[in-house]
Image (spheres, rainbow, N blue to C red):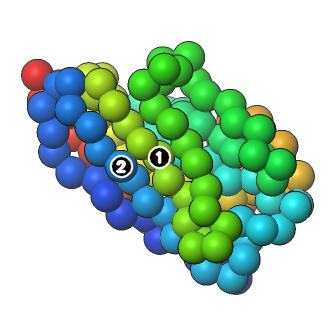
């Protein structure tokens, strides 16, 4: 059973920063079969990929967040991070951590089988 526990969301003003954390106990971050990713879903919109990290640490970012967001993982702490800088109102969404088997660094939600409960990020102008 894969458990993913996100935290770190909150409310910030435009231009601010937040760091999201996803704890994934059980060693999944060290399992070469699994990729990890961050997704987000804004009200009335489909869930979209933000960043994906393959087991070999290759990382893919959505165009909308390139240069502003950085995804990383700490295998020793079983933790995935998403550092978000220069936040804008359009970044407002629920952010989800996900794990998928044999996904490499792709960002298709359908390929990820394990999901956290989500954490709300709200950016005001």
- Rendered image: mark on residue 68: none
Secondary structure at numbered mark 1: strand
Where in the figure is residue 89, as x and y percent of width and height?
23, 24
Asked whether residue 4 is in view, the answer is no
Count of picture labels:
2
Q: In the displayed structure, does residue 29 sit left or right of residue 121? A: right
Q: Residue at x 88, y 52 (%)?
A: 102
* Measured Cα–Cα span from mark 2 to mark 1: 6 Å
Q: Is residue 114 above or below residue 50?
A: below
Where in the figure is residue 44, as x and y percent of width and height?
36, 32
Q: Residues within 10 Å of mark 1 (few under 14, many from 20)?
A: many
Q: Is residue 10 above or below residue 70?
A: below
Q: In the displayed structure, does residue 35 sit left or right of residue 96? A: right
**Quadrant assignment for the C terminus:** top left
Asked whether residue 55 is in view, the answer is yes
Picture quadrant where residue 71 is located: top right
Residue under circle 2?
19
Q: Residues within 10 Å of mark 2 (few under 14, many from 20)?
A: some
Q: Residue at x 75, y 46 (%)?
A: 57
**Quadrant assignment for the N terminus:** bottom right
Sequence-first disc among 2 and 1? 2
Q: In the displayed structure, does residue 6 sit left or right of residue 52? A: left
Residue under circle 1?
82
Q: Nearer the viewer, residue 41 or 15?
A: 15
Q: Nearer the viewer, residue 4 or 111?
A: 4
* 2 and 1 marks in contact (CB < 8 Å): yes
Q: Nearer the viewer, residue 92 or 69?
A: 69
Where in the figure is residue 69, as x and y percent of width and height?
46, 32
Secondary structure at numbered mark 2: strand
């Amino acid at each position: 059973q894969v458990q993913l526990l996100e935290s770190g969301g909150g409310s910030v003003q435009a231009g601010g920063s937040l760091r999201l954390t996803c704890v994934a106990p059980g060693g999944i971050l060290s399992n070469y079969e699994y990729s990890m990713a961050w997704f987000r879903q804004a009200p009335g919109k489909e869930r979209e990929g933000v960043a994906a990290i393959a087991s070999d640490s290759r990382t893919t970012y959505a165009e909308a967040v390139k240069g502003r967001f950085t995804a990383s993982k700490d295998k020793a702490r079983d933790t995935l991070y998403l550092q978000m800088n220069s936040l804008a109102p359009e970044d407002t969404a629920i952010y989800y951590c996900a794990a998928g088997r044999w996904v490499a660094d792709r960002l298709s939600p359908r390929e990820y089988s394990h999901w956290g409960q989500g954490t709300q990020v709200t950016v005001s102008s």
